[in-house]
Amino acid sequence: MQHTIERKHAIEKANQILAKKPVYLDTETTGLHETAEIVEIAIIDDEGNAIFESYVRPTQSIPPDAIRIHRITDDMVKKAPLWPTIWPEIRSILTENHSAIYNADYDLRVMRSSLKHYNLSWINQFQTSCIMKLYAMFRGDWNPQYRSYRFYSLEDAGRQCRIPLSNTHRAKDDSLLARELLHYMAKANP
C-alpha cells in the first residue's frame, strides 16, 4: 500500500518536472573522488536536441579507471576548452531552465569541484530535479540498511524499464537515457 502511494507520487512528480520543459545534463569525469573534474558535458532539451556538448580539458590526467568506463583519453581532451571558458554558457543554460539530472548530487558536486580548481566560486542558483532519487521512489525497493529506497545505476534503471537506449557512459547518450527514463515514469500506471 505504502509503495503504491509513493509510486503515484513519483509519477505525479515526473509529470510536474516535464511540465517545466527541463533540460537534461550529464557529465563524464576524472573519477569519483572529491577533486574530480569534468572531461565531457552535455545538456539536451526535452525534445532530445543537444543544447551544449563539449569535451573539457581538466587540470589533471584522466586516470585509467575512468578511461575504462567512458573511454575518454587525455589525447581526446588536450585541445578542449578549460572549464572556466565554458562555465558562463553552462551556468546561463542552467539558470534559465529547470534541469533534470540522473544523480544530480554527483554532477553538481563535480561542477563545484571543477570550479574550485580555478579558484572560482560556486553559487547554486539552479532549479534541479534528481531523476535517480525519483526513480528509486518509483521503483520502490526498500533498503533497510539505509532506511530509504534503493538507488540504481542509470544503466540498470534503463534496463528495468526496457528503454532501448544503452548507457554508454558518454554525456550526450546518458542525458538522452535520463530523459527517456523521466518520460517513462511520467507515463506509467500507478
Image (spheres, rainbow, N blue to C red):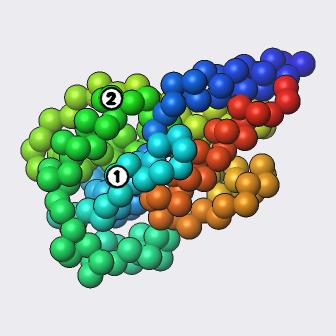
Query: Residue type at mark 2?
Result: Glu
Residue 32 against residue 90 in the figure, above or below: below
As drawn, is 105 to the left or to the right of 183? left
Choose top left, top right, bottom left or bottom right for residue 36.
bottom left
Give yes or no for contact between labels 2 and 1 (Cβ–Cβ under 8 Å).
no
Mark 2 / mark 1, whichever is N-terminal:
1
Q: Which mark is residue 96?
A: 2
x%, y% of residue 42? Answer: 40, 54
Q: The residue under label 1 is which amino acid type? A: Phe
Residue 161's mark? none
- Looking at the rendered image, the quarter that the N terminus falls into is top right
At horizontal 12% and vertical 41% (from top left) the residue drawn is 120
Residue 131 shows up from this direction: yes
Residue 130 pos. (x, y %): 53, 34
Could you tell whether 51 is left or right of 167 in the image?
Answer: left
Q: Quadrant of residue 74?
A: bottom left
Q: CA distance from mark 2 to mark 1?
A: 14 Å
Residue under the point 38% across and 49% down: 51
Residue at image x 64%, y 28%?
14
Q: Is residue 148 visible?
A: no
Q: Foreground residue, 103 or 33?
A: 103
User: Disc 1 designates what residue?
Assistant: 52
* Structural crowding at the residue carrying mark 1, measured as other residues with C-alpha within 10 Å and reported as few (<14), some (14–19) or many (≥20): some
